[in-house]
Amino acid sequence: MKILISGSHGLVGTALIKSLEADGHDIFRLVRHYPHSPSEIEWSPDRYSIALSLIEGFDAVVHLAGESIAEGRWTDEKKKRIRESRVKGTRLLGDALANLTQQPKVMISASAIGYYGDRGEESLTEASSPGDDFLSDVCVEWEKATDLAKEKGIRTVNSRFGIILDKDGGALRKMLTPFRMGIGGRIGDGKQWMSWIALDDVVAGIKFSLTNDSLRGPVNFVAPNPVRNAEFTKTLGRVLSRPTIFPIPAFGVRLVFGEMADALLLSSQKVHPNHLMEANYQFQYSQLDEALKHTISSSS
């Protein structure tokens, strides 16, 4: 397949491109700088600019670009970048694809389980309603930005990513240092649900979605066995052979991270991958201990 990918240097994009190229697919990257190779295509979401002639004829598009939500405190300016980098870029790309003569068969556009907000003990599926906080609002707008592509008949998957496990990026990378030092522990009361997924399953799930015509609309990219934060903490400590006796109180997390603490570290989201399961996707890592063992022991 001839595949166009945005966010190619991020955690998911890097791993996905490596896997797709190993499979023999022809990969092109959407970049925000002057192209340095024939496989790069420049676009500018800030100027709402993209050359339609350069994105004709792709079989599939995977859109992963967006400002990191986990880097830096959520100032008003940071929140503006988080929202606009997702909504404007997605709307630009979706509208452009909808107006092509040769449209792709599928567009996979990133989203997140932040869509659901803090939901306590509620079991969440793709049919669940959105939450009412900042990230929920961003995700609703983010997914809505793909509407024109959907209306023009492009099969569109809104991949709602959970907590992606990778030792070289994302939340796990930040957790590994204190846990290896033996000063890791639960966050808050540890009762909040964490819906996680191994990076290998993210990559395999995207590749599965590229060719599975039954998948469209929201798809939860999470493993089928969410765990509470306290269980995640104990499991990570066990895998690393380290104690986990230093809990971080909720007020301390809020003091350090501000608003981001409630949205990313203290919120509870018990999310299930119904659509992937119904499509018969076979998870490589469905249990947390085996996912962590594989992730931490794997080579970079």
Image (tube, rainbow, N blue to C red):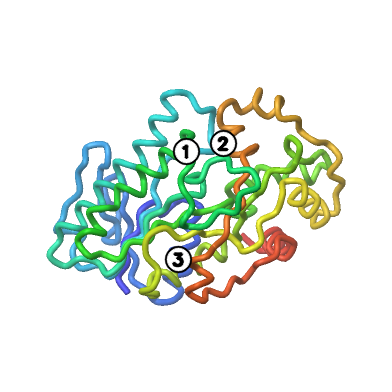
Quadrant of res 98: bottom left
Amino acid type of disc 1?
Leu
Above/below status of 213 relative to 14 = below
- Drawn side of residue 98 relative to residue 180, left or right: left
How far apart are the two marked residues, 2 and 1, measured between alpha carbons? 7 Å
Query: If the image is split into quadrants, where does the N terminus sit?
Result: bottom left
| Mark 2 nearby-residue class (10 Å; few <14, some 14–19, many ≥20) | some
Quadrant of res 61: bottom left
Q: Which of marks 3 and 2 is nearer the N terminus?
A: 3
Q: Are marks 2 and 1 in contact (CB under 8 Å)?
A: yes
Number of numbered discs: 3
Residue 179 on image: x %, y %? 78, 44
Please tell me which residue lies in front, 229 or 116. 116
- Drawn side of residue 207 relative to residue 71, left or right: left
Amino acid type of disc 3?
Ile
Residue ID for mark 2: 263
Is label 3 in a helix, a strand or a loop?
A: helix
Residue 84 on image: x %, y %? 34, 36
Q: Earlier in the sequence, mark 2 or mark 1?
A: 1
Can you see residue 172?
Answer: no
Residue 21 on image: x %, y %? 42, 70
